Image: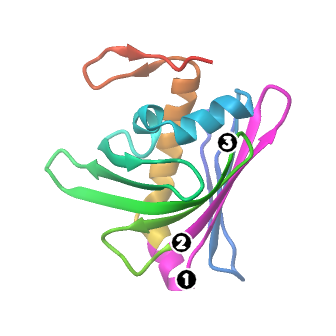
Amino acid sequence: MTTSSTNHRHETQIAADPAVPTIVITREFDAPPERLFRAYTDPDLVVQWLGPRRLTMWIDRYDARSGGSYRYVHREDDGTEYGFHGVFHEVRPDERIVQTFTFEGFPDGVSLETAVFADLGGRTRVTTTSLMGSFEARDAMIASGMGRGVLEGHERLDELLRGRQSGDDGSRTEMEA
């Protein structure tokens, strides 16, 4: 499986390895690694971009440091909630985040995710590799619509990095350098 966004200069690539139960997501952003890393680790910023546009997100905890943990929830307009949690195993500022990821609707499907932030001289390539426990778990994640959520989340992250993210109340929010 390979999908990509074609709405932006930088495409999101999502690939499933046929030999290993992984999903690799690669995307370049027009911002230096320290800004991307902050967007991935500051809960006030994470809530502004992570996931599909149609869902409301709140964070119960988000301690993005080696040994820290997180839990957040996405909510549909009809009240349906999707909870996610995990542990940050390694957090290296501006370079790398290694964490577990669990969708609470499928608690046996824990994945290990590694996000690497590559400095491209004012731009950053983020490559996230998710290793699942089985091909079935990987395929279920893909079938869940995660690709759409990733693409929309990256669009929202682009907007945040450009300082054009709108709040739910119509207000503008900005990400300082």
- Disc 2 vs disc 3: which is toward the camera? 2
Q: CA distance from mark 1 to mark 3?
A: 28 Å
Q: Is residue 27 magenta?
A: no
First of labels 2, 3 by sequence position: 3
Find disc 1 in the rendering and name its residue: 133
Q: CA distance from mark 2 to mark 1?
A: 7 Å
Circle 2 SS class = strand
Mark carried by residue 11: 3
Q: Are marks 1 and 3 in contact (CB under 8 Å)?
A: no
Find disc 2 in the rendering and name its residue: 111
First of labels 1, 3 by sequence position: 3
Tag count: 3
Front residue (pair 164, 148): 164
Range of magenta residues: 111-140
Determine whether 26 is above or below 18 in the image. Answer: above
Determine whether 137 is above or below 4 in the image. Answer: below
Which residue lies most toward the left here?
Answer: 78
Q: Is residue 134 magenta?
A: yes
Return the x and y of residue 10 as percentages of the image width and height: 69, 36
Report the amino acid beneath label 1: Gly
Q: Residue at x 50, y 55 (%)?
A: 68
